[in-house]
Image: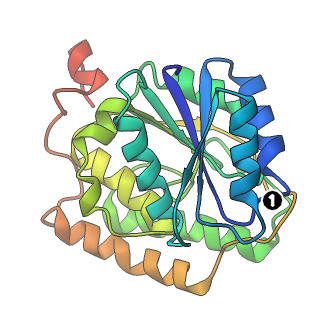
Amino acid sequence: MSDTLVIIPTYNEKENAEAIARAVLEACPEADVLFVDDNSPDGTGELADRLAEGNPRIHVLHREKKQGLGRAYLAGFRWALERPEIRFILEMDADFSHDPKAVPQLRSAAQTADLVLGSRYIGGIRVINWPLNRLILSTGAALYVRLITGMPFTDPTGGFKCFRREVLAAIDLDGIHSNGYSFQIEMTHTAWHLGFRIAESPIVFEERREGQSKMSGGIVNEALWMVWKLLARCGWRRRPRVVHPQSVAAQAGGAA
């Protein structure tokens, strides 16, 4: 097991699973891949098992039923935390909307940050093959999150991230309740208020190559309400109070 784990949740991603695993491992020889499959009816889980049998750098975590993206990532985080050799834990989609070639970039940025957000919007918009209404929804959601929570990040809803182990170990994973876009917001907001250093790294986002999007109106509504719950949970504070003692900023003697 290497020190870097890329967690890829899957539900009906049979068209993409083998190609995404191969691309990640080629791009980042330091990494292992963990598929978290929600009992995909199209056979994605069985395919992932075959891939794991042929490659010790591929692992599979099976779940009994579809419970949402957030629950899948939490299961993957717990799996990673049970293995002390893993120091960097990445999230990414199975559908090539996140470029596997950017994995080393995020891992490298995590040498000086506790959480690295792959940002579609820092320094400009880098989104390919999205309809205008989807782009407006995404950029509007990012602005909404910043205005309500105070988080200064350009892409708080993005799902391409790299956590240092210390961040996930410090978060009460049982207390994370959201699932879709709001899961990404909640994880970042929680890490930020714990005093961890968060950086953004520019990425290119491309609409999925195969399969169907998991976007729904329920996911959007959950995100709309979750930001207010997060604000209330931290006592309506819009800035962290302290630097976490395990943050790279604390270890370097600097500010978050």
How many marks do you count on the picture? 1
Residue 199 in sight from this viewpoint = yes
Relative to residue 56, is residue 253 drawn left or right?
A: left
Describe the element under mark 1 as helix, strand or loop.
Answer: loop
Q: Residue at x 53, y 85 (%)?
A: 218
Disc 1 residue crowd, few under 14, some 14–19, many 20+, Cα 10 Å = some
Colour scheme: rainbow
Q: Residue at x 46, y 48 (%)?
A: 76
> In the rendered image of this protein, does residue 223 appear above or below residue 47?
below
- Residue found at the very far top of the displayed protein: 252
Q: Residue at x 45, y 74 (%)?
A: 223
Relative to residue 210, is residue 119 drawn left or right?
A: left
Amino acid type for the residue under numbered disc 1:
Glu
Nearest to the observer: residue 90 or residue 16: 16
Give the x, y percent position of residue 51. 75, 39
Quadrant location, the C terminus: top left
> In the rendered image of this protein, does residue 135 appear above or below residue 19?
below
Nearest to the observer: residue 49 or residue 32: 49
Give the x, y percent position of residue 52. 68, 37
Relative to residue 3, is residue 247 drawn left or right?
A: left
Q: Which residue is mark 1?
A: 207
Give the x, y percent position of residue 141. 53, 69
